[in-house]
Amino acid sequence: MRRRARNESGQSLVEFTIVLLPLLLVLFGIIEFGLIMFQKVSIEHDAREAGRLAAVNDPAGKTAATGVFFTCTPNPNTGNASPSVGDTITAHVPYTYTYVIPLLSSFLGSSLNLASTASFRLEAAPINYAGQGGC
């Protein structure tokens, strides 16, 4: 009986190493997914903040997020070609997320493109946003 027990002494170690790789892959995948969701929420917040600042003609909206650009949509009921109070301004925030865990980037590619937009009605004429993507 003792002799047989000695021969199976490494069985748990072998089973653990077989299970370890898929377990770590799932664990790191969960961590990476959490980081991606954090970045997505941050980008959505940046788009809302930039759009709100643009709607009230605050120049800080241009620098609220990196790479932010704006588009204006004139209200068809007013007949104005240039943006004025009541028209819609949309903030677009693009972002390229690079994976933190190199093992996952070999399966999913080197980066992931994230973007968010937020639209608001202009409360002031967009003087500070002239030349910013149609405004």
Image (tube, rainbow, N blue to C red):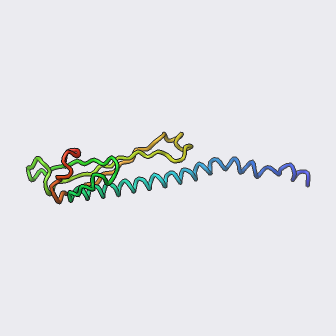
Percent position of residue 63, x then y: 30, 52
Q: Is residue 120 above or below residue 113?
A: below
- Residue situated in front as seen by the camera: 24 or 8: 24
For the question of whether residue 23 can be seen, the reply is: yes
Apparent side of residue 133 relative to residue 44 in the rendered image (left or right):
left
Residue 1 is at least partly visible in this image: no
Residue 62 percent coordinates (x, y): 27, 52
Give the residue at x 48% y 40%: 110
How many discs mark residues in the rendered view? 0
Depth order, front residue of 30/128 = 128
Q: Is residue 12 left or right of residue 60?
A: right
* Residue 112 or residue 3, whichever sits in front: 112
- Quarter of the figure with the N terminus: bottom right
Task: Reply above or below: 93 against 49.
Answer: above
Question: For the point 33% across and 49% down, which residue is it?
Answer: 93
User: How far across and down, in percent of the image, does residue 53 sit?
Assistant: 25, 58
Front residue (pair 5, 114): 114
Residue 97: x %, y % from top left: 44, 46
Q: Residue at x 20, y 57 (%)?
A: 57
- In screen coordinates, is 76 left or right of 25? left
Q: Residue at x 57, y 51 (%)?
A: 26
